[in-house]
Image (cartoon, helix red, strand yellow):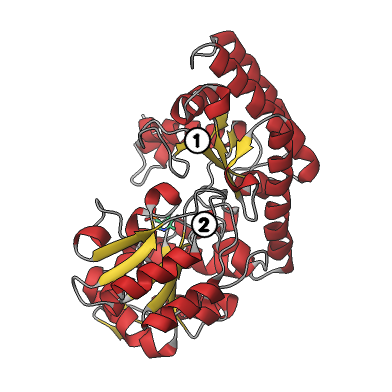
């Protein structure tokens, strides 16, 4: 009898969880991943986030901690901060936020009094919950005024933003989105914020990778603070980041800890540092531009197949399709496509007549496919897969035949084989 090892591998210790991880790896290798907020991180980022830094408590900031044993944590967090500042050309960076939502709460805590008035893009127009939507803490503990997009072209209505700002005199104005396919005019937002004495905060969770790669303008020169996730187009671990002007540095740091959080997730800080270094390379900049080229190419291919895109196209990594003409809801289309190996999400379109849980549109992004090495010439096949899936789903009342789904999944697997998924290696 061999004795059981004292510290067995995951596969030995917990075959059930190990099998689920293997299943997820495989799913991510073999499906066409078009969820606009997702990506593939590098093997290096994955390794850093699975490190022994997860064992350590480090409440406080480099040089000012409440625990001992900071020999490696302090230099690690300082390195992540310096890399973030240089990457975004920001005066100050806080790398501790657990994710995008806590980062936004910390910004509010730092820059506004409780109950203050804020303004943000409404959720149905493409904004994020944390920009003051009524069910979010940011809409419960703060007075929130929401602006939207124009009815005719579905672009952000800066005249409405100015009118509402003058009427409500918000302490803080959010600009940023989760489902808006166009470039944001940060300078125009800054002008409005200055007119009413509000702090302008950009939340670039979706486009951070495009910003640092030079494929989208940077909000940093125009904003009091900039918040972001690190795991969307930036291709880092799941986490948050706040950048701000020097004058707000102390308030932001105090809001993150001890205002909102306890000990930072140091293993995530390590992975953030790795991702920031990756994102500072010329290769990443080329990748960011490729993301935008691919999104535009996919938009053209879908329009050629008769699809209606919100705003008529895209300037960034994401597209919103209005499926009204196809006669299928966004949710039913998303569920059907998932069965065929295509992942995207149902999404409200501006002025959507349908309910949020079963909206008229789907949202898709090309960041993950671009991370696998796809170029514009591959978007024709991607559009063809999407079109076939939606046509079948619409024809079968949202329930595509099993044989159709199996065949589509097989074709997609074959199509993806020459594009290895970063971090996951070969199948
Ligand atoms: C994704 C997103 C967030 C929230 O990030 P989590 O990490 O999911 O909390 C915040 N703001 C915007 C604009 C986002 O798109």
Which-is-in-front pick, marks 2 and 1?
1
Seen at 43% across and 83% down, the residue is 194
In this image, 170 relative to 231: left or right?
left
Residue 402, image x, y percentages: 54, 10
The quadrant the C terminus occupies is top right
Residue highlighted by disc 1? 361
Q: Can residue 68 be seen at all in this image of the molecule?
A: no
Seen at 52% across and 52% down, the residue is 180
Residue 198, image x, y percentages: 36, 79
Q: Can residue 111 be seen at all in this image of the molecule?
A: yes
Mark 2 lies within 8 Å of ligand 1 (Cβ measured): yes
Q: Judging from the image, what secondary structure is the residue with disc 1 in?
A: strand
Q: Judging from the image, what secondary structure is the residue with disc 2 in?
A: loop
Residue highlighted by disc 2? 206
In this image, 282 relative to 60: left or right?
right
Q: Residues within 10 Å of mark 1 (few under 14, many from 20)?
A: many
Looking at the image, tell me whether mark 2 or mark 1 is earlier in sequence order.
Answer: 2
* Ligand 1 in which quarter: bottom left
Picture quadrant of residue 185: bottom right
Instruction: Give above or below for 42 relative to 362.
Output: below
CA–CA distance between discs 2 and 1? 19 Å
Picture quadrant of residue 418: top right
The quadrant the N terminus occupies is top left
Find residue 281 and name its label.
none
Seen at 22% across and 74% down, the residue is 259
Circle count: 2
Q: How crowded is mark 2: few (under 14 residues within 10 Å), some or many (20 or more)?
A: many
Instruction: Give above or below for 126 relative to 251.
Output: above
Mark 1 lies within 8 Å of ligand 1 (Cβ measured): no
In this image, 372 relative to 143: left or right?
right
Along the line of sight, the residue nearer the viewer: 148 or 24: 148
Along the line of sight, the residue nearer the viewer: 102 or 64: 102
């Amino acid at each position: 009898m061999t004795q059981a090892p004292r510290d067995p591998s995951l596969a030995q210790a917990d075959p059930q969880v190990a099998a689920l991880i293997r299943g997820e790896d495989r799913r991510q290798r073999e499906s066409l991943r078009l969820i606009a907020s997702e990506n593939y991180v590098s093997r290096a980022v994955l390794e850093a986030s699975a490190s022994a830094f997860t064992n350590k408590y480090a409440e406080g900031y480099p040089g000012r901690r409440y625990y001992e044993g900071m020999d490696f944590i302090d230099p690690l967090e300082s390195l992540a901060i310096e890399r973030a500042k240089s990457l975004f050309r920001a005066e100050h960076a806080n790398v501790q936020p657990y994710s995008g939502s806590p980062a936004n709460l910390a910004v509010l805590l730092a820059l506004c009094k409780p109950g203050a008035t804020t303004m943000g893009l409404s959720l149905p127009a493409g904004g994020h919950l944390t920009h003051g939507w009524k069910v979010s803490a940011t809409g419960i503990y703060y007075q929130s005024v929401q602006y939207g997009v124009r009815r005719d072209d579905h672009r952000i209505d800066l005249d409405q933003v100015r009118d509402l700002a003058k009427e409500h005199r918000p302490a803080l104005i959010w600009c940023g989105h989760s489902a808006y396919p166009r470039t944001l005019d940060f300078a125009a937002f800054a002008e409005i914020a200055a007119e009413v004495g509000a702090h302008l905060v950009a939340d670039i969770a979706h486009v951070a990778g495009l910003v640092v790669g030079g494929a989208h303008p940077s909000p940093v020169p125009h904003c009091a603070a900039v918040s972001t996730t690190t795991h969307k187009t930036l291709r880092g671990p799941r986490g948050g980041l706040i950048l701000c002007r020097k004058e707000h540095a102390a308030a932001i740091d105090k809001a993150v800890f001890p205002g909102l959080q306890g000990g930072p997730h140091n293993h995530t800080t390590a992975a953030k540092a790795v991702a920031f270094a990756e994102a500072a390379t010329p290769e990443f900049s080329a990748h960011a531009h490729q993301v935008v080229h691919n999104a535009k190419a996919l938009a053209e291919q879908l329009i050629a197949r008769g699809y209606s895109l919100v705003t008529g196209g895209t300037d960034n990594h994401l597209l919103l399709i209005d499926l009204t003409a196809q006669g299928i809801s966004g949710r039913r289309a998303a569920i059907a496509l998932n069965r065929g190996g295509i992942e995207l999400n149902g999404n409200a379109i501006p002025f959507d007549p349908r309910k949020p849980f079963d909206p008229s549109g789907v949202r898709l992004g090309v960041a993950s496919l671009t991370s696998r090495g796809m170029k514009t010439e591959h978007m024709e096949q991607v559009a063809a897969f999407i079109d076939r899936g939606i046509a079948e789903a619409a024809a079968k009342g949202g329930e595509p035949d099993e044989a159709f789904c199996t065949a589509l999944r097989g074709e997609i697997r074959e199509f993806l084989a020459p594009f290895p998924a970063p971090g996951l290696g070969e199948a």
